Amino acid sequence: MDKKYVDEIIAGYMQKIFGFALSKTINTDKAEELASRITFDVYTSLLKAGEVYNINGYIYRVASNVYARFVNEKIKGRYISLDEVNIPCENDFTIDFEKNEDYIRLRKEISYLGKIQREIIVMHYFQKLKLYEIAERLNIPLGTVKWHLHDARNQLKNKLEDINKMSERINLGMNPVKIDFGMSGNPGPENKNTSYYLSKLISQNVVYAAYYEPKTITEIAEELGVPAAFIEDEVAYLEDYSFLDKIAGGKYQTNIFIREPSKEVMEEIHKLFLKYAKVICEKYIPLLFDTMKNYKSMKIYTPENDFNFLMWSIIGYSCRYMLRAPFDWGTLSRYNVKRKDGGEYIALGYVKKDIKVNYNEEKYNVPNNMTRGSSEHIYNSWQLNSYYDSRPNTYIENKSEDYEYLYEYIAGKITKIPEYADKFKRLFDKGYLIQKNDSEYVNMIISKDSENDFKNLLPGMTEELKLIGEEFDKEIYNLEKSQYPAHMHDLYRAWCTNCLSDQNMVAYVLEILLANGTLKPLTENQKHSVNTIMFCDTLPE
């Protein structure tokens, strides 16, 4: 690993390493010695290492190994007393582990306390400072010191008396969750969303720990099985970007809509989607086919005049936009959170679990559709990724400039000369231009109408479908609401509106239509741009 990069890592972790050492030794001199050893081992091992994906975990493992060697040196100490709880602080606790088990537990429990309570406990019980001296050092009122000391002492006594709680507390430390993140809204000028800020495993487990019920930093640390010093900066970072909210009592509550799968609920939802997808296929799709049979008179370009390919995209688009009852989008957008980086969105998470369900989950997992910005000539573009296309399943690869380049090609503004080679390469790589014999053709559905005018061409919901949609919304909400914490119920109720037009429903509808022969399979070229529509003022020739 590059030395300059390693130097930056070490500089960023010095305080955490010392906090780890202090939590283990409860002695500043020994903590400094242990911290210097850990720092040396971390530094030398990182210089020899290749790419490290989880720096937090890597340093924690090195620190634990150094500490294991450190405790082989005999440490003679004394007893400390926390009001009737006497803990021996002596002997080599690798040799005499059973006699020192309480002491080891005490040191671990002290490391779980918040920063100010850790400092007060160490200063009072180990450095023998009087309470007024602690108040002066920390520059806080004497009464505050007394309150923190009393609260910390009670916490330690209760925890030392309850061994069973300890095994529950380290659940996430022993079995951490992994979460996929997304968003609903505007990621901001830097185009960074939830997955960027919560890419680290420790970040994911911090927000998960505080999701179902609010927790203090101490409680979060306990659940993760790490010293509080190791997550204090992480909590501050997540709070700064509004993924954690600080509430009363010094507790934190996760402000991310996290979905945690349950086999039983997933299979019941799958049944509901199948049931209502059949209704759409019976009561709406025939109206759509009847409307689009005269597409050539509608200012719509279809590659090679392939009606089947057109209907794949029209069905996807119509399911998302036309099967919606009138809805005030402010109802959902009011849950958007303004972020430090300029983004404004609902953060979404999905806990990854190895759950075996009785259907192909991948086939029905459809990300939210994407729109890209307009220019003078391009009104808008729409794209929906699904099981049936061959595109990368990421919003980052759907670039606004791709549509700009395609428009320039359609309008004859770029030709095959070296100056435009990169633009042509991008269009061919994306599959938006297809080479055929000695020429090429545009491989995308394009409407000369604006998106609003295009929607006016399509059949809307009948009164019967509106009632069916309301029934579907209620069934989904009642089935799933118990899966979410109370502070997410309002958001989830708003989310459970117009479920008939849910993006996953598109996959169910396409599957039925493909199985019954209404739709024919796509070609490999068509898989590049299926369920993509560009709205602009010029059509390809």
Image: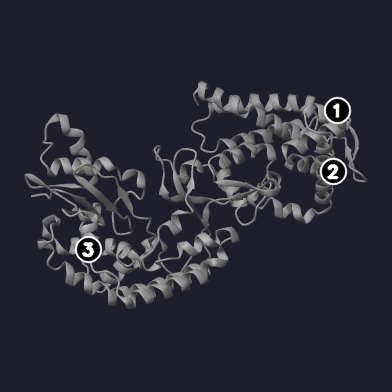
In this rendering, the answer to whether 82 lies above or below 348 is above
* Display colour scheme: one colour
Amino acid type of the residue that numbered disc 2 sits on in the rendered structure: His
Q: Nearer the viewer, mark 3 or mark 2?
A: 3
Question: Dots 3 and 1: beta carbons under 8 Å?
Answer: no
Residue at the (58%, 43%) spot, across then down: 202
Q: Nearer the viewer, residue 275 or 186?
A: 186
Question: Dots 1 and 2: beta carbons under 8 Å?
Answer: no
Q: Nearer the viewer, residue 308 or 173?
A: 308
Sequence-first disc among 3 and 2: 2
Q: Nearer the viewer, residue 249 or 254?
A: 249
- Quick check: can you spot residue 162? yes
* Other-residue count near label 3 (Cα within 10 Å), few / some / many at <14 / 14–19 / ≥20: few
Q: Which mark is residue 116?
A: none
Q: Nearer the viewer, mark 3 or mark 1?
A: 3
Q: Nearer the viewer, residue 525 or 379?
A: 379
For mark 3, what is the residue?
456
